[in-house]
Amino acid sequence: MKIGLKLYSTNVALIPDALRLKKEGFFDYIELYIVPGTYEETIDAWKDLGVPYVIHAPHSFHGVNLAQADKWETNLQRFNEARQFADDFGSDIIIVHGGNNGTFNETIRQISLLNEKRIVLENKPQKGLYGEICVGWSPEEFHTASHAGVLSGTALDFVHANCASNSMGVEVMKLVSEFMIFKPKIFHLSDGERVSEKDTHFNFGKGNLNLHQFVSVIPEGGLLTIETPRDQSRGFRDFIHDVRYLYNIVAHGNSKLESM
C-alpha cells in the first residue's frame, strides 16, 4: 500500500520536516486539506516539492455543506479553491463530504453542478459530533450516487464505517464489504472506539478497533491516508510511530507493536 500524510494547507511550516520524512520513506503522498482562503498565501510553498498530492476539499468545519441548497454559493466558492490546488498539483482526486442535516438528493445535485470529474465522495458516520445527521453514510446512498454518474470514485473511511455500523446495528466488516463494492480510490484510517456512533481519531493502539481487519481489505498499491492526531510539540514523532505500527500490522497480522 501507499501511505499518505494528512496536512492542512496552512501547515507550511511543516514542509521541511515533511520532506525529510518523505526521503526516509515514511509516506508516499500528501493528502492536503484545503483551508478556505489560503490559496494565494500558501500555493508557492506547496508547489514543486516533488511529492504527489491528494486534495481534500473543505467540509462542514469550514462552512461547506453540499446537502443544503442555501449553501450553494459558499460551497462553489470554496470547492473552486480546492480545485485550483488540484489543478496546480496535477492531482486526480478531490475528496468531498456529503454534508449534514439536508438531503442526499441535494448533495448529488450540487456535485453534478460542480462539474468536476475528479470528485471522490467519502463515507460518513450517521451521527455527527454535535448531533447533526450526516449525509452519505450508507451504501444505499453511494449506489444512488453511482447510478447518477456524478462521482469519479469513493473514499472509504474505516472509522466512519465503524460508527455507521453501530448506528445501524450491523457488523462493521459487513458494512465495509458493501462499501468495497465501489472499489474505493483511497482509504482513511485511525484508531477509535469500537462501540461508538461518533467519530473519534486516536493514534494506533490508543483505541480498541481491529485495525488488521481493515488493513486486510486494502488492495495492493492502494492509497491509505493516516488520520491520527499529532501533538505539535512532538513534531512528526506521533506520525512516525503510527507508520511503524501500521507496518507491524501488515507484517504480523496483529495490532501490537513493541515499544521503540
Image (cartoon, grey):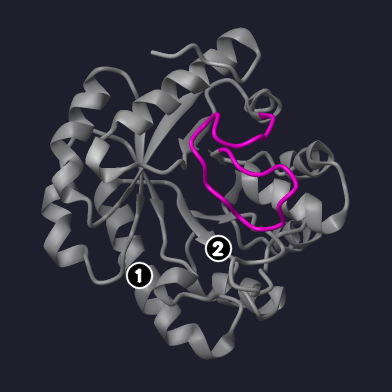
Q: Main secondary structure of the magenta part?
A: loop
Q: Is residue 197 magenta?
A: yes
**Residue 105 lies in quadrant:** bottom right
- Residue at the spot x=28%, y=33% of the render? 236
Eyeballing the image, is 159 above or below 134? above
Kind of residue indicated by mark 2: His
Residue at numbered disc 1: 80
Which of the pair 215/84 is nearer the observer? Answer: 215
What residue sits 24% from the left and 72% below the top?
A: 37
Q: Nearer the viewer, residue 199 or 16?
A: 199
Element under disc 2: strand
Q: Is residue 159 left or right of residue 59?
A: right
Q: Is residue 69 above or below residue 165?
A: below
Confirm or deny contact between disc 1 and disc 2 (CB under 8 A): no
Q: In the image as oriented, which residue stretches furthest toward the bottom?
A: 70
Q: Badge 2 is on which residue?
A: 97
